[in-house]
Image (cartoon, rainbow, N blue to C red):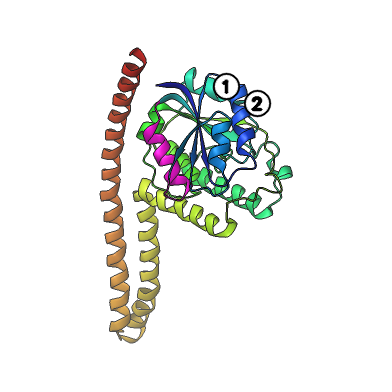
Amino acid sequence: MDKVAVLIPCYNESKTIKKVVEDFKKELPDAKIYVYDNNSKDGTDKIAKDAGAIVRYETRQGKGNVIRTMFREIDAECYIMVDGDDTYPPDKINEFVNAVLEENVDMVIGDRLSSTYFTENKRPFHNVGNVTVRGLINRIYKSDIRDVMTGLRAFSYRFVKTFPVMSKGFELETEMTIHCLDKNLKIKNIIIDYRDRPADSPSKLNTIPDGIRVIKTIFGFYKNYKPLKFFSILAFLLFATGMCFFVPVFIDFLHRGVVKIPTLVVSVLFFMCAVQSLFAGMTLDNIIKNSKQTFELKLIDCERELKDRKDK
C-alpha cells in the first residue's frame, strides 16, 4: 500500500505532462505518481514514463471512467488527484496530504475561485459556469463549498473505496462533492493558485454541453439523495396545477349549476399524481435512510481494512 499516491488522468497532454510529473515529484519525493492514459494520440504516455511516472491505461473514454479505474486499482492512505494540464501549482500539496493523514479529512478541495482563477482563466463562460454550479450546490445542500469544479483534490482511503463513480465525464467533480455532502464526510477547502493552460494546450472541456451535463447531474443527485424534498416540490406543483383546473369548474358550478366534466377529470388526475408523487418521495426517503445506515457500516469495515493493510 502506498503512503501517498498522485493520480493524473490524461488525454493528449504531451505539452504539459512532463512538467506536472516533475513538479509533483519534487514536492512529494516519496509519493507514487500514476498517470492513466485515456487513448492519447500524442505520446503522452511515453513522456510521462520518461519523467518517472507509473503509466497505466484506460481505453473507455472519459475522465469518470479513468478515475473509476484508478480508485479500483490503487491502494493508498492518501490520494492526490490532479489534472495533467499544468494549471495547478503544487506548492501547497503538502497541506493537502497533512489534512488527510493528520486531520482525517475525507476530501480536500483546491479552491481556485478564491485566488487567481478569474484573472487567469480566459474563458468567460467557464467563470460563469463555476460560480453558478457552486451557488446551486451550496443553496441546495446548505454547504460552503468554495470550488466545485476544481481538478486538484485529495482523498482519504475510506472515501476512495466507498465512492461509487457514476459519471463518465467532467461532471465527476460535481458528483464527488455531492457524495461527500450527502454522506456527511469531512471536507476542507484550501486556497490554491491557478494558472491558465499554455496556448498550445487546448482545453478538453466543451463549455455548453459539459455545463448542461453538470447541471443535470446536480438535479439528478438531488432527486436521488433528497427524494422526499424533490417529490414534495413536484407534488406541490401538480396539486397547484390541478387547482388551476378545479377552481374555475367549482366557481362555474356554484354560479350556474353546471359541471364541466372533462376539466374536472383533468384536475382530479393532477391531484392523484400529486398524491402518488408525495408517497413516492416518502418511500424513497426511507430507502435512502437505510442506505445511509449501510454506508456507515461500510465505512467501519473500510477503516478496519485500512488498519489491517497498514499493520502488514
Q: Is residue 143 left or right of residue 91?
A: left
241 in relation to 74, above or below:
below
Q: Is residue 22 left or right of residue 158?
A: right
Reading the image, the residue beneath label 2 is: 91
Residue 309 belongs to magenta span: no
Residue 167: horizontal and vertical position, in percent? 42, 48
Q: Residue at x 71, y 50 (%)?
A: 122
How many other residues sit within 10 Å of disc 2, few (<14), some (14-19) or many (≥20)?
few
Q: Residue at x 68, y 41 (%)?
A: 117
Separation of disc 2 and disc 1 at Cα? 10 Å
Residue 66 belongs to magenta span: yes
Please tell me which residue lies in front, 127 or 203: 203
Amino acid residing under circle 1: Leu
Q: Quadrant of the C terminus?
A: top left
Residue at the right extreme of this rendering? 119
Residue 282: horizontal and vertical position, in percent? 28, 50
Residue 263: horizontal and vertical position, in percent? 33, 80
Residue 211: horizontal and vertical position, in percent? 55, 55
Secondary structure type for disc 1: loop
Q: Nearer the viewer, mark 2 or mark 1?
A: 1
Identify the disc placed on residue 307: none
How many other residues sit within 10 Å of disc 1, few (<14), some (14-19) or many (≥20)?
some
Using the rendered view, name the quadrant where residue 304 is placed.
Answer: top left
Secondary structure type for disc 2: loop
Please tell me which residue lies in front, 81 or 226: 81
11 in relation to 190, above or below:
below
Amino acid residing under circle 2: Asp
Reading the image, the residue beneath label 1 is: 28
Instruction: Say whether disc 2 or disc 1 marks the residue closer to the N-terminus.
Output: 1
The rendered magenta stretch, by its main secondary structure, is classed as helix
The residue stretch that appears in magenta: 59-75
Q: Is residue 291 left or right of residue 194?
A: left
